[in-house]
Amino acid sequence: MILVIAGCSQDGDAEIEHVTTLDIAEPAYAPAAIEQAEMVAESRYAPGVPSAGMPSDLFINRDENRERYSGKDVSAIRIAANEPVSTFSVDVDTGAYANTRRFLTSGALPPESAVRTEELINYFRYDYPRPTDRSKPFSVTLDAAASPWNPAARLVRIGLRGYDLPRAERPAANLVFLVDVSGSMNDRDKLPLVKQALSGLAREISPQDKVSIVTYAGTTGVLLEPSSNPAEIRAALAQLQSGGSTAGAAGLDLAYAMAKKGFIKGGVNRVILATDGDFNVGIYDTDALIQKIEKQRDSGVTLTTLGFGTGNYNEAMMEQIANHGNGNYAYIDTPMEARKVLRDEMSSTLFTIAKDVKIQIEFNPSVVSQYRLIGYENRALREEDFANDAVDAGDIGAGHQVTAIYEVIPAGAKGWVSDRRYQAAAKTTPGVHASEAAFVQLRYKLPDGEKSRLLQYRLPASALNTRQAPRGDFAFAASVAAYGQKLRGDTLLAGYSWDAVEGLAGRQDEYLRQEYLALVETAASLN
C-alpha cells in the first residue's frame, strides 16, 4: 500500500506544500496511517483559523503559544584526564520524538528545548540480541565505529535489550486511567484521541486485570469502578466530554487512592494520566507535583503520563513527573502513535523487569583523550550516585531497548578542545589497563528488589582503532543521533548536512523508519 501525506505551511504570503510518500508494508498500520494523513491534511488553514486537527495558527501566532519545555543545554565536552567517569540514568521515554514529529509535520521546527536526542534514538528498535539468561533481565551490547561527522572521533554505542514477557507470564495489572476532561481538552487531537488510545489499551487487558477510570476538570470523580470487562471500559470512555478548569493535582490524589484501593500484591499497579498538562487549579507547580509523586511511588504505584495536544501543552511537567513516578512518558500525536504505545508496546509500557537502572562508564585517559555523551542531559547523575541504592533512576519494561552513544577522541588525535599549557607534563602514561578503552558498569534492581545488582564490561582499546563507518542498525542510530543534535542546534554538527543525515540512515523498508526519512527531508526544507 502506498500512502501520500500532503500538508502545507506558510512563509510570509506564500503557501508551501509538503508531499510525502510512504510505502506501508505493515497492513495493520494502514487504517491508523490514513487517519493520521487526514489529520495532517486538516492543518491547511489560513493564519488565525483553528484547525480541527493540528492547527497551523499554533506556529504562526507565536504569542498565543503557551507550550512549556525544560530542555537543558547540549552536553559539554569532557577531558578524560580530568573527568574520566560519566554516570547517567537510563531513559526509555519516547515522547520527544512524537512531539518533534508533530512540529515538523505541521510545518515548523521544534523548539530546541523540546528535543531530547536520547528519546529520538530510543523511539526505534535495534538488532540487539535477546537475553539468554532470565537471571539478567537485559542483554548488553558494546560496539564502536568511526564518527561519520568527525574523522578524528569514534562513536561508542551501549545497547540494552530487556527480555520479552510472554502474555501467559504477565502479572495481573491494576490500572487507573486518569483522564483530563477540562475545557482545554476540547480539540480533536486531545480528548477524542485520548478515548481512542485508552480504548485500544482496554482491548489488551486480560480477565485477571482490572481498570478504573478517574476524571478531573474543575472537580474530580470516579467514572468507572474497577472492571475487567473491555466493553464496559470502552463504553465508559465513550461518555467522556470536556469542560471546566483543570484540577490536575486533585485528580492525581484520587487516582492514587483508587490504585491503592485495588492494589494487587506482586502485580502491576499504575496510574495512567492522559492530559495536555495544563493544570490551573490547586497545585500546578512542577516541583510541588514532583514531591507529591515521589511520596506515592514508594507505595508501589507507578505513573505513566500520556501527553496530547498543542498550544498549551506542558511537556516540562509531563516528562518530569513520569520520571519521578517510576513510569514512562509518551506523547500521542496520531492514532498510529496511540497504537504503537498502548497496544504494540503494551508490555514494555506497563511491565517493569528492572528498576533504578544506572550506567557508568570510566574512560581510560591513556586511550581516550576527550568524550561527550549524546543526549541524556536531564538524566545525568553524580559519580557517587551510581552505588547509592537510595538514588532513583530509570526503569526498563519487558522488551524495552535503551541505546546510549558516546562520541570520543582517541588519545593522540585532534580533539575539540586544544591541549592546555600545562597539560603535557600531566599526561597519563599507559599502565596495566592499556588494553582497555573504557570500563562499563550497570546497576539495576529487580522489580521487587531493594538492593542493586552489578554488571561489568570492558571496551577493548582495539575497538577504537577502526576507521569503518557505522553499518546497519548502528548507522541508523547514528543518523537519528545526528538528526536530534542538529535540531538541538549542536554546533559540533553544524557542518554535517541534512542530506548526509538522511544518507547515513540508508534505505529503509519498515514504516516508522520510512517516516523518519521523510521527517529528515522536512527538517532540511525548514532550515
Image (spheres, rainbow, N blue to C red):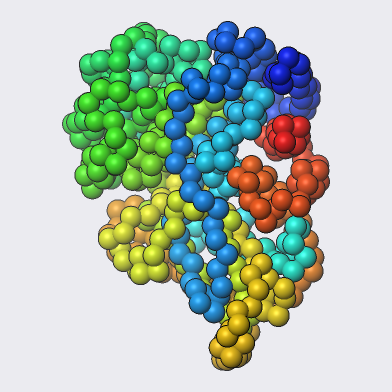
Residue found at x 54% / y 57%: 75
Q: Nearer the viewer, residue 398 or 121?
A: 121
Q: Measured from the top left, where is residue 61 in percent x and y?
A: 56, 19
Instruction: Residue 170: tell me if it is visible.
Output: no
Q: Residue furthest front?
A: 421
Residue at 62% x, 55% y: name it. 128
On screen, residue 166 above or below 57 = below
22 sits left or right of 209 in the view: right
Q: Is residue 76 left or right of residue 300?
A: right
Which image quadrant: the N terminus?
top right
Residue 131 higher or lower than 298, as above or below: below
Find residue 390 and report its horizontal and vertical position in percent.
27, 60
Q: How many marks?
A: 0
Measured as percent of width and height from the top left, residue 138 is found at 50, 57
Task: Name the image quarter holding the C terminus.
Answer: top right
Left or right side of 147 for 229: left
Q: Which residue does the image show at 55% across and 61% down from the upper left?
A: 76
Question: Can residue 223 be seen by looking at this rendering?
Answer: yes
Q: Residue at x 77, y 65 (%)?
A: 151
In depth, the one of 123 and 78 nearer the eye is 78
Q: Give the answer, above or below, for where 72 lies relative to 509.
A: below
Q: Position of residue 107 (x, y in %)?
A: 67, 25
User: Nearest the camera: 318 or 351?
Assistant: 318
Q: Quadrant of residue 119?
A: top right
